[in-house]
Image (cartoon, grey):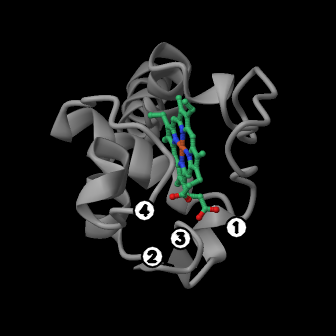
Amino acid sequence: MLALGITLLFLAACKKSNRGPQLIEQYGCTTCHTIPGVEGHGAIGPRLEGIGARPAISNGKVPNTPENMAKFIHEPASLNPSSSMPALNIPDADAQEIAEYLRTLK
Ligand code: HEC
């Protein structure tokens, strides 16, 4: 019974975990950004702490919805043509997971 309980706890923990920080590291976002929970202190782009609580991103030009955040990470210029962030060709699934993580930064 105890083993079952532990297994269920473990499964619940796995389901909740998000690969965001790992993907952010993998794609090198912190070469340009400082992002809570991820190593690195890039200063070329804005700091992303509290980004999940902001009403708009990219100099206030893009409403901060889950769809927009993922799309922006995939290709910034598709939402803000004057964005100085380069397109990194992040696959959609990964961009979505990164966006989910950024939303937790309040
Ligand atoms: C080559 C440098 C560079 C890299 C690499 C980079 N960014 Fe950016 N990013 C920028 C710059 C510059 C801006 C500011 C321009 C803008 O907001 O459109 C920016 C803006 C942003 C914003 C909006 C910030 C705000 O305050 O509104 C988010 C979110 C973001 N980047 C996420 C990411 C993520 C996630 C990655 C990795 C997948 C990444 N960036 C990789 C340079 C970079």
Q: Give how far across and how far down residue 11 sits, in percent.
A: 36, 31
Could one spot residue 1 in this view of the protein? Answer: no
The residue furthest top is 26
User: Residue placed at 18% from the left, 40% from the top?
Assistant: 92
Q: Name the residue beneath numbered marker 4.
A: 82
How far apart, in angstroms, are the residues tagged by discs 1 and 3? Answer: 14 Å
Question: Which residue bears the numbered disc 1?
Answer: 106
Taking the spot 69% from the left edge, 28% from the top edge, the residue there is 38
- How far apart are the two marked residues, 4 and 2, measured between alpha carbons? 17 Å
Judge from the rendering whether residue 76 lies leftward or rightward of residue 78; answer left or right. Answer: right
The reply to whether discs 3 and 2 touch (Cβ–Cβ < 8 Å) is yes
- Which residue of the protein is positioned furthest toward the left in this rendering? 92
Q: Are marks 1 and 3 in contact (CB under 8 Å)?
A: no
Q: Is residue 28 above or below residue 97?
A: above
The amino acid type of the residue labelled 1 equals Lys
Q: Earlier in the sequence, mark 4 or mark 1?
A: 4
Identify residue type, mark 3. Ile
Cβ at disc 4 under 8 Å from ligand 1: yes
Q: Which residue is mark 2?
A: 64
Between disc 4 and disc 2, whose residue precedes? 2
Q: Position of residue 88 (x, y in %)?
A: 34, 29
Q: Nearer the viewer, mark 4 or mark 2?
A: 4
Is 5 drawn above or below residue 57 in the view shown? above
